[in-house]
Amino acid sequence: MSKSPPTLRLDRLLANLGYGSRREVQRLVVMGFVTLDGVPLTDSDQRIVITPDLSARMTVDDEPLDPPPGMVVVMNKPIGVTCSHKEQGPLVYSLLPERWRRREPAISTVGRLDKDTSGLLLMTDDGALLHKIISPRSNVTKRYDVTLDRPLRGAEENIFASGELMLESETTPLLPVPMEVASPTRAFVTLTEGRYHQVRRMFAAVGNHVTALHRDRIGSLSLPDDLPAGEFRILGAADLALVFARA
Ligand code: URA
Protein backbone atom coordinates (compact mmCIF):
# COMPACT_ATOMS: atom_id res chain seq x y z
CA MET A 1 0.00 0.00 0.00
CA SER A 2 1.45 3.42 -0.91
CA LYS A 3 1.80 5.96 1.91
CA SER A 4 -0.60 8.92 1.76
CA PRO A 5 1.15 12.31 1.51
CA PRO A 6 1.63 14.30 4.74
CA THR A 7 -0.51 17.32 5.57
CA LEU A 8 0.39 20.59 7.30
CA ARG A 9 -1.65 23.55 8.47
CA LEU A 10 -1.34 26.35 5.93
CA ASP A 11 0.22 28.82 8.39
CA ARG A 12 2.72 26.18 9.58
CA LEU A 13 3.60 25.28 5.98
CA LEU A 14 4.29 28.91 5.02
CA ALA A 15 6.17 29.71 8.23
CA ASN A 16 8.30 26.56 7.80
CA LEU A 17 9.14 27.64 4.25
CA GLY A 18 10.46 30.96 5.57
CA TYR A 19 7.65 33.28 4.45
CA GLY A 20 7.43 34.85 7.93
CA SER A 21 6.33 34.16 11.48
CA ARG A 22 3.03 32.31 12.05
CA ARG A 23 1.39 35.70 12.64
CA GLU A 24 2.91 37.26 9.50
CA VAL A 25 1.80 34.42 7.26
CA GLN A 26 -1.71 34.47 8.79
CA ARG A 27 -1.87 38.10 7.63
CA LEU A 28 -0.79 37.08 4.09
CA VAL A 29 -3.66 34.57 4.02
CA VAL A 30 -6.25 37.05 5.34
CA MET A 31 -5.19 39.55 2.68
CA GLY A 32 -5.82 36.96 -0.05
CA PHE A 33 -2.15 36.68 -1.11
CA VAL A 34 -2.16 32.87 -1.02
CA THR A 35 -3.97 30.83 -3.66
CA LEU A 36 -4.44 27.13 -4.37
CA ASP A 37 -5.53 26.04 -7.85
CA GLY A 38 -6.27 29.70 -8.60
CA VAL A 39 -8.60 30.18 -5.61
CA PRO A 40 -7.55 32.47 -2.71
CA LEU A 41 -7.28 30.58 0.59
CA THR A 42 -8.86 32.35 3.52
CA ASP A 43 -8.36 29.95 6.42
CA SER A 44 -4.78 29.62 7.66
CA ASP A 45 -5.82 26.65 9.87
CA GLN A 46 -6.71 24.65 6.74
CA ARG A 47 -4.61 21.51 6.33
CA ILE A 48 -2.72 21.32 3.05
CA VAL A 49 -1.76 18.02 1.48
CA ILE A 50 1.98 18.21 0.76
CA THR A 51 2.27 16.78 -2.72
CA PRO A 52 5.33 17.24 -4.97
CA ASP A 53 3.27 19.36 -7.40
CA LEU A 54 2.27 21.90 -4.72
CA SER A 55 4.56 24.65 -6.12
CA ALA A 56 2.71 24.40 -9.44
CA ARG A 57 -0.67 24.77 -7.72
CA MET A 58 -0.10 27.25 -4.91
CA THR A 59 1.00 30.88 -5.20
CA VAL A 60 2.14 33.42 -2.64
CA ASP A 61 1.95 37.03 -3.75
CA ASP A 62 1.50 35.83 -7.36
CA GLU A 63 4.70 33.74 -7.27
CA PRO A 64 4.80 29.91 -7.24
CA LEU A 65 5.17 28.50 -3.73
CA ASP A 66 8.76 27.53 -2.86
CA PRO A 67 9.42 23.76 -3.12
CA PRO A 68 7.53 21.97 -0.33
CA PRO A 69 9.38 20.02 2.39
CA GLY A 70 11.17 16.95 1.09
CA MET A 71 13.01 18.84 -1.60
CA VAL A 72 16.34 17.83 -3.12
CA VAL A 73 18.59 20.36 -4.81
CA VAL A 74 21.38 19.57 -7.25
CA MET A 75 24.09 22.23 -7.31
CA ASN A 76 27.21 22.69 -9.38
CA LYS A 77 29.38 23.77 -6.47
CA PRO A 78 31.98 26.34 -7.45
CA ILE A 79 35.47 26.44 -5.96
CA GLY A 80 35.81 28.78 -2.97
CA VAL A 81 32.59 28.11 -1.07
CA THR A 82 32.35 25.94 2.03
CA CYS A 83 29.83 23.15 2.78
CA SER A 84 29.07 24.32 6.31
CA HIS A 85 26.37 26.20 8.19
CA LYS A 86 28.77 27.92 10.55
CA GLU A 87 32.25 28.45 9.12
CA GLN A 88 33.61 31.87 8.17
CA GLY A 89 33.65 32.98 4.54
CA PRO A 90 31.33 32.19 1.63
CA LEU A 91 29.04 29.19 2.24
CA VAL A 92 27.17 27.05 -0.32
CA TYR A 93 23.92 28.10 1.37
CA SER A 94 24.50 31.71 0.28
CA LEU A 95 24.02 30.49 -3.33
CA LEU A 96 20.40 29.54 -2.52
CA PRO A 97 17.50 32.02 -2.37
CA GLU A 98 17.57 34.11 0.80
CA ARG A 99 14.18 32.82 2.05
CA TRP A 100 15.39 29.21 1.87
CA ARG A 101 17.86 29.96 4.67
CA ARG A 102 14.90 30.38 7.04
CA ARG A 103 13.34 27.01 6.17
CA GLU A 104 12.48 24.54 8.90
CA PRO A 105 13.70 21.82 8.66
CA ALA A 106 16.88 23.42 7.38
CA ILE A 107 18.53 22.46 4.11
CA SER A 108 21.83 20.58 4.52
CA THR A 109 24.44 19.31 2.13
CA VAL A 110 24.49 15.55 1.51
CA GLY A 111 28.06 14.95 2.66
CA ARG A 112 30.64 17.59 1.90
CA LEU A 113 32.98 18.73 -0.81
CA ASP A 114 36.17 20.59 0.17
CA LYS A 115 36.26 24.34 -0.36
CA ASP A 116 38.64 23.72 -3.29
CA THR A 117 36.53 20.96 -4.86
CA SER A 118 33.88 21.76 -7.49
CA GLY A 119 30.97 19.85 -8.99
CA LEU A 120 27.94 17.77 -8.12
CA LEU A 121 26.54 18.54 -4.67
CA LEU A 122 23.16 17.41 -3.38
CA MET A 123 21.30 19.35 -0.70
CA THR A 124 18.08 18.41 1.03
CA ASP A 125 15.78 19.19 3.96
CA ASP A 126 14.88 15.49 4.25
CA GLY A 127 17.07 14.05 7.01
CA ALA A 128 16.06 10.43 6.39
CA LEU A 129 16.94 10.72 2.71
CA LEU A 130 20.26 12.41 3.52
CA HIS A 131 21.23 9.56 5.83
CA LYS A 132 20.13 6.97 3.30
CA ILE A 133 22.41 8.49 0.63
CA ILE A 134 25.48 8.76 2.87
CA SER A 135 24.96 5.46 4.72
CA PRO A 136 27.72 2.94 3.86
CA ARG A 137 24.93 0.35 3.56
CA SER A 138 23.51 2.15 0.51
CA ASN A 139 26.82 1.81 -1.36
CA VAL A 140 26.23 5.01 -3.30
CA THR A 141 29.35 5.71 -5.37
CA LYS A 142 30.88 9.14 -6.02
CA ARG A 143 33.02 9.76 -9.09
CA TYR A 144 35.75 12.41 -9.15
CA ASP A 145 37.63 13.93 -12.07
CA VAL A 146 41.17 14.44 -10.79
CA THR A 147 43.87 16.66 -12.28
CA LEU A 148 47.40 15.96 -11.08
CA ASP A 149 50.56 17.94 -10.69
CA ARG A 150 52.82 15.13 -11.96
CA PRO A 151 52.29 12.31 -14.48
CA LEU A 152 50.91 9.03 -13.17
CA ARG A 153 53.62 6.41 -12.61
CA GLY A 154 51.56 3.41 -13.68
CA ALA A 155 51.12 1.57 -10.37
CA GLU A 156 48.32 3.78 -9.01
CA GLU A 157 45.44 1.82 -10.55
CA ASN A 158 46.53 -1.41 -8.81
CA ILE A 159 47.37 0.29 -5.52
CA PHE A 160 43.95 1.97 -5.35
CA ALA A 161 42.13 -1.23 -6.41
CA SER A 162 43.97 -3.38 -3.85
CA GLY A 163 41.83 -2.59 -0.80
CA GLU A 164 45.11 -2.35 1.12
CA LEU A 165 45.99 1.32 0.85
CA MET A 166 46.31 2.84 4.31
CA LEU A 167 46.07 6.61 4.56
CA GLU A 168 48.31 8.47 6.98
CA SER A 169 47.11 8.38 10.61
CA GLU A 170 44.34 5.86 9.84
CA THR A 171 44.02 2.32 11.12
CA THR A 172 41.85 0.63 8.47
CA PRO A 173 42.73 0.38 4.77
CA LEU A 174 40.58 2.01 2.12
CA LEU A 175 37.98 -0.03 0.30
CA PRO A 176 39.04 -0.69 -3.31
CA VAL A 177 38.82 2.43 -5.49
CA PRO A 178 38.43 1.89 -9.25
CA MET A 179 40.45 4.33 -11.35
CA GLU A 180 40.26 5.18 -15.04
CA VAL A 181 43.21 6.98 -16.60
CA ALA A 182 42.22 9.81 -18.94
CA SER A 183 45.69 11.25 -19.62
CA PRO A 184 49.10 11.17 -17.88
CA THR A 185 47.89 13.87 -15.47
CA ARG A 186 44.15 13.18 -15.35
CA ALA A 187 42.12 10.29 -13.93
CA PHE A 188 38.63 9.42 -12.69
CA VAL A 189 38.28 7.67 -9.34
CA THR A 190 35.09 6.19 -7.91
CA LEU A 191 34.70 6.13 -4.13
CA THR A 192 32.23 4.20 -2.01
CA GLU A 193 33.57 5.70 1.22
CA GLY A 194 33.93 9.36 2.09
CA ARG A 195 36.96 9.72 4.29
CA TYR A 196 38.33 13.15 5.10
CA HIS A 197 40.05 14.65 2.00
CA GLN A 198 40.11 11.10 0.65
CA VAL A 199 41.04 11.72 -2.98
CA ARG A 200 43.74 14.29 -2.17
CA ARG A 201 45.24 11.98 0.48
CA MET A 202 45.14 8.93 -1.84
CA PHE A 203 47.23 10.72 -4.43
CA ALA A 204 49.53 12.15 -1.75
CA ALA A 205 50.07 8.53 -0.59
CA VAL A 206 51.43 7.65 -4.06
CA GLY A 207 53.67 10.73 -4.24
CA ASN A 208 51.48 13.00 -6.33
CA HIS A 209 49.48 16.16 -5.73
CA VAL A 210 45.91 16.94 -6.80
CA THR A 211 45.71 20.35 -8.50
CA ALA A 212 41.99 20.25 -9.37
CA LEU A 213 39.16 18.06 -8.11
CA HIS A 214 35.65 17.94 -9.53
CA ARG A 215 32.82 15.53 -8.66
CA ASP A 216 30.84 14.62 -11.76
CA ARG A 217 28.66 11.72 -10.62
CA ILE A 218 26.81 10.35 -7.59
CA GLY A 219 25.50 6.81 -8.20
CA SER A 220 24.24 7.02 -11.78
CA LEU A 221 23.30 10.70 -11.51
CA SER A 222 25.64 12.92 -13.56
CA LEU A 223 26.13 16.63 -13.06
CA PRO A 224 23.88 18.18 -15.74
CA ASP A 225 25.96 19.65 -18.62
CA ASP A 226 23.77 22.74 -18.70
CA LEU A 227 24.16 23.63 -15.01
CA PRO A 228 26.82 26.36 -14.69
CA ALA A 229 29.08 26.58 -11.62
CA GLY A 230 27.27 28.28 -8.74
CA GLU A 231 23.80 27.37 -10.01
CA PHE A 232 21.30 24.81 -8.77
CA ARG A 233 17.98 23.20 -9.64
CA ILE A 234 15.37 21.05 -7.94
CA LEU A 235 15.94 17.34 -8.49
CA GLY A 236 12.87 15.37 -9.61
CA ALA A 237 11.96 11.86 -8.43
CA ALA A 238 13.33 10.14 -11.57
CA ASP A 239 16.74 11.82 -11.20
CA LEU A 240 16.78 11.10 -7.47
CA ALA A 241 16.26 7.40 -8.23
CA LEU A 242 19.47 7.55 -10.32
CA VAL A 243 21.45 8.32 -7.14
CA PHE A 244 20.63 4.81 -5.90
CA ALA A 245 21.04 3.09 -9.27
CA ARG A 246 24.30 1.19 -9.85
CA ALA A 247 26.77 3.30 -11.83
N1 URA B 1 38.05 13.84 -1.69
C1 URA B 1 38.72 14.98 -1.40
O1 URA B 1 39.92 14.95 -1.16
N2 URA B 1 38.03 16.13 -1.39
C2 URA B 1 36.69 16.22 -1.66
O2 URA B 1 36.13 17.32 -1.66
C3 URA B 1 36.02 15.02 -1.96
C4 URA B 1 36.72 13.84 -1.96
Image (spheres, grey):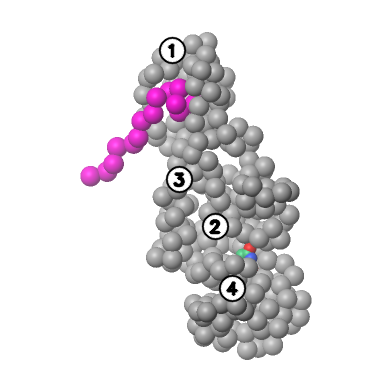
Q: CA distance from mark 3 to mark 4?
A: 28 Å
Give the residue number, with chain letter if any, for mark 3.
Answer: 126
> Farthest residue in the right direction?
149
Neighbourhood count class around disc 2 (C-alpha, 10 Å): few under 14, some 14–19, many 20 upward = some
Q: For mark 2, give the secondary structure.
A: loop
The kind of residue tagged 4 is Val
Q: For mark 1, give the secondary structure.
A: loop
Query: Which comes before the other along the chain, label 2 or label 1?
Result: 1
Percent position of residue 25, x then y: 52, 20
* Residue 42 numbered mark, or none: 1
Q: Residue at x 67, y 50 (%)?
A: 87
Q: Which residues are magenta?
A: 1-14
Regarding residue 221, the answer to whether it shows in the image is: yes
Q: Residue at x 56, y 82 (%)?
A: 166
Give the residue number, with chain letter if any, for mark 4.
Answer: 189
Percent position of residue 176, x then y: 50, 79
* Residue 111 numbered mark, or none: 2
The kind of residue tagged 1 is Thr
Regarding residue 57, the answer to whether it shows in the image is: no
Q: CA distance from mark 2 to mark 4?
A: 17 Å
Disc 1 under 8 Å from ligand 1? The reply is no
Instruction: Judge depth for marks 2 and 1 and give the one in front.
Output: 2
